[in-house]
Amino acid sequence: GAVVSQHPSRVICKSGTSVKIECRSLDFQATTMFWYRQFPKQSLMLMATSNEGSKATYEQGVEKDKFLINHASLTLSTLTVTSAHPEDSSFYICSAREAGRVDEQFFGPGTRLTVL
Amino acid sequence: DAKTTQPPSMDCAEGRAANLPCNHSTISGNEYVYWYRQIHSQGPQYIIHGLKNNETNEMASLIITEDRKSSTLILPHATLRDTAVYYCIVRATIKAAGNKLTFGGGTRVLVKP
């Protein structure tokens, strides 16, 4: 089956620093990748949709200058949380849709970010 | 996309069938019913999806009512590893919806020995 990986699995950083999270499709080409955020005991909230080679589309209320998304290849998308603050501490999850397939999204294992 | 309603939690016994209901009374004709589950601190896992007909795979069965206003996910023989939050999601055909999955509150299923 299609596998999506995320790196790192968990990260702790100081307030004000930037953190980059990678999302990779390991055995398929992903034309579209999605980034979600999940706070404790809450559901997943879509942050943005990224298409390979074009700018990401952000959901309402998500600051594009704070959450930088790059989808430079068909197997890699990155999310950079710039100038992270404690309120950005969350579980960040990516998903990917395989090129030519419209029925499934494959999710990564998530990255737990803790900002001190 | 149509909104879904699920019970917030349910318990079931190990080895027994688990029946997870979902209401989607405002579903429209081009919307599919998807089920995902999320085990604690992991990413969601796809289970099954359907449009009108009942569906079955190695993980579960999906029963959709004739009017499509509700559905039931059936885990035929629940195991302790099936303990998770189960999300029922209704989504339009891909081009119309931009592939988005909108997660609701889900049902927190606890399988007990």
Image (cartoon, coloured by chain):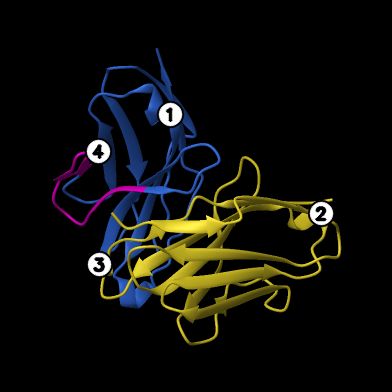
Q: Which mark is residue B30?
A: 3
**Which residue lies under the disc numbered 1?**
B83
Q: Which mark is residue B107?
A: none
* Secondary structure under the numbered disc 1 in the rendered image: loop
Residue closest to the eye, A68 or B97:
A68
Amino acid tagged 1: Thr
* Secondary structure under the numbered disc 3 in the rendered image: loop
Q: CA distance from mark 3 to mark 4?
A: 25 Å
Question: In the rendered view, would you say A15 is above or below A57?
Answer: above
The picture places residue B18, in percent across and down from the top left corner, at 30, 26
Whether callout 1 and callout 4 share a subunit is answered yes
Front disc: 3 or 1: 1
- The quadrant of the picture occupied by the N terminus of chain A is bottom left
Tell me which chain the residue with mark 2 is part of: A
Whether callout 1 and callout 2 share a subunit is answered no
Q: Which mark is residue B59?
A: 4
